[in-house]
Amino acid sequence: MKYTVIITKDEDGYYVVNVPALPGCFTQGKTKKEALINIKEAIRAYIESLKKHNEKIPRDNAEEITVHA
């Protein structure tokens, strides 16, 4: 499955990542690479929990667009 992630850098210099399609699924890392590794683990754990509780796994409804400026 593919999910859109939002990456921001906080005031302490950490990269914070969240998954809009999976409420409450977020993590951080000292580097962007570390944050992306961590979010993959968080997504896996989130989905495993949903399966364990027989809950529906949300799909990512995000769309990519190209804007010529």
Image (tube, rainbow, N blue to C red):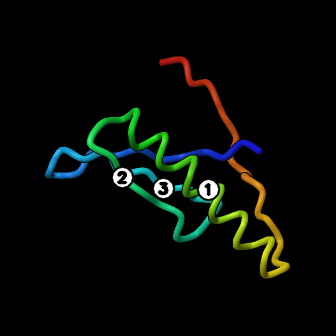
Horizontally, is 29 left or right of 4 in the view? Answer: left
Label 2 Cα crowd, 10 Å radius (few <14 / some 14-19 / many 20+): many
Horizontally, is 24 left or right of 12 in the view? Answer: right
Looking at the image, tell me whether mark 2 or mark 3 is earlier in sequence order: 3
Instruction: Identify the residue at image location x=81%, y=77%.
Output: 55
Looking at the image, tell me whether mark 2 or mark 1 is earlier in sequence order: 2
| Kind of residue indicated by mark 1 | Ile
Q: Is residue 8 above or below residue 54?
A: above
Helix, strand or loop under label 2: strand
Task: Please name the residue that numbered disc 3 is placed on.
Answer: 18
Residue 2 place in picture, x, y as percent = 72, 42
| Kind of residue indicated by mark 2 | Gln
Relative to the observer, which residue lies in front, 17 or 44?
A: 44
Q: Which mark is residue 19?
A: none
Task: Please name the residue that numbered disc 2 is placed on.
Answer: 28
Q: Answer yes or no: do the residues labelled 2 and 3 have beta carbons within 8 Å?
A: no
Horizontally, is 25 left or right of 10 in the view? Answer: right
Task: Please name the residue that numbered disc 1 is placed on.
Answer: 43
Residue 31 place in picture, x, y as percent = 30, 36
Instruction: Identify the residue at image location x=66%, y=46%.
Output: 3
Tell which tag, 3 or 1, sits nearer the viewer. 1
Q: Is residue 37 above or below residue 39?
A: above
Q: Is residue 33 above or below residue 69?
A: below
Helix, strand or loop under label 1: helix
Residue 36 place in picture, x, y as percent = 47, 40
Q: Answer yes or no: do the residues labelled 2 and 1 have beta carbons within 8 Å?
A: no
| Kind of residue indicated by mark 3 | Asn
Instruction: Identify the residue at image location x=47%, y=48%.
Output: 38
Instruction: Identify the residue at image location x=80%, y=71%.
Output: 51
Estimate the spatial distance between the alpha carbons at disc 2 and disc 3, rounded to whole Å.
9 Å
Relative to the observer, which residue lies in front, 24 or 29?
A: 29
Quarter of the N terminus within the rendering? top right
